[in-house]
Image (tube, helix red, strand yellow):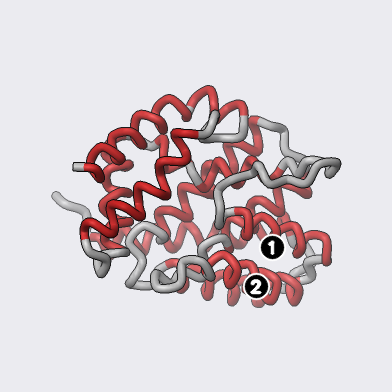
Amino acid sequence: MTPDPRVCHSGRVHALQGRWLTDCRWALPSADRADVATLGADLLRRWSEPHRRYHDLTHLTEVLGAVDRLARAVSLPEADRAAAVLAAWFHDAVYIVADPEGNERDSAALAARALRPLGADDALVEHVVSLVLDTAAHDLDDASPGLVPDPARPVLHDADLWILCSPTGRFDEYCRQVRAEYSHVPVAAYAQARSAVLRPFLVRPHVYATDLARREWEPTARENLARELTRLAA
């Protein structure tokens, strides 16, 4: 029997509601529970918008799971883990297909507006905002010399790109979902633009930034990327 997608959606929302409350109890222990629940409902409403095909609840769930795994693998300090988890929740909270260059900026602004009333201090808010903005370029080579590396940056970077190393069926579904989000773009223009997004991951020395992802995820990611670039060139 084929699962009812409405039931699957409802179950995922319920699980993420519980996850949001747990994350906030840990990261923002002084936050009012009613305010936390209200913000969580707004975030899940955003992630459930009907125009989303890939940037949806499944993507959010995958990124959160990848953050958890990578944070354990690198023994991420608690404050940095809190920032990475909150940034995962907010990183695509604003998603407008027609304004791809503004989504991360607007998602970061939403995080700043939403977290301060919950009692987040300036350091945490600024950290979350910085991490969300990182997801725009998916490139950590722009760090200024002399600055102490932020250990949360590679964790969120790799978590957001987990999909590139996903099993063949899921990766191919992801490719179809991204195409569906840009269904208004002609085939040739989409292939050119999408190839320009994906090709740099194969050109640079590593797709991922953490040791675990480079060791366990990167070979599959490179195979997936090469396959999709071949399809786009056909």
Q: Is residue 110 above or below residue 87?
A: below
The percent coordinates of residue 17 (x first, y second) are: 52, 63
Image vertical order of residue 228 relative to residue 109, above or below: above
Q: Secondary structure at mark 2?
A: helix
At 74% from the left and 69% from the top, the residue drawn is 31
Q: Report the amino acid beneath label 1.
A: Val
Q: Which label number is shown at residue 129?
A: 1
**Label located before the other in sequence (2 or 1):** 2
Q: Is residue 200 left or right of residue 118?
A: left
- Tell me if mark 1 has few (under 14), some (14-19) or many (20+) residues whose alpha carbon lies within 10 angstroms of its own: many
Secondary structure at badge 1 equals helix
The percent position of residue 175, horizontal first and vertical second, equals 30, 49
Q: Which mark is residue 109?
A: 2
Instruction: Determine whether 155 is above or below 178 in the image.
Output: above
The residue positioned 75% from the left and 77% from the top of the image is 117
Labels in figure, total? 2
Please name the amino acid that badge 2 sits on: Ala
Residue 134 in percent (x, y) is at 62, 54
Q: Quadrant of the C terminus?
A: top left
Is there a contact, CB below 8 Å, between mark 2 and mark 1? yes
**Relative depth, front residue between 228 and 189:** 189
For this view, does 80 lie left or right of residue 160? right
**For mark 2, does the 10 Å Cα neighbourhood hold few (<14), some (14 to 19), or many (20 or more) residues?**
some
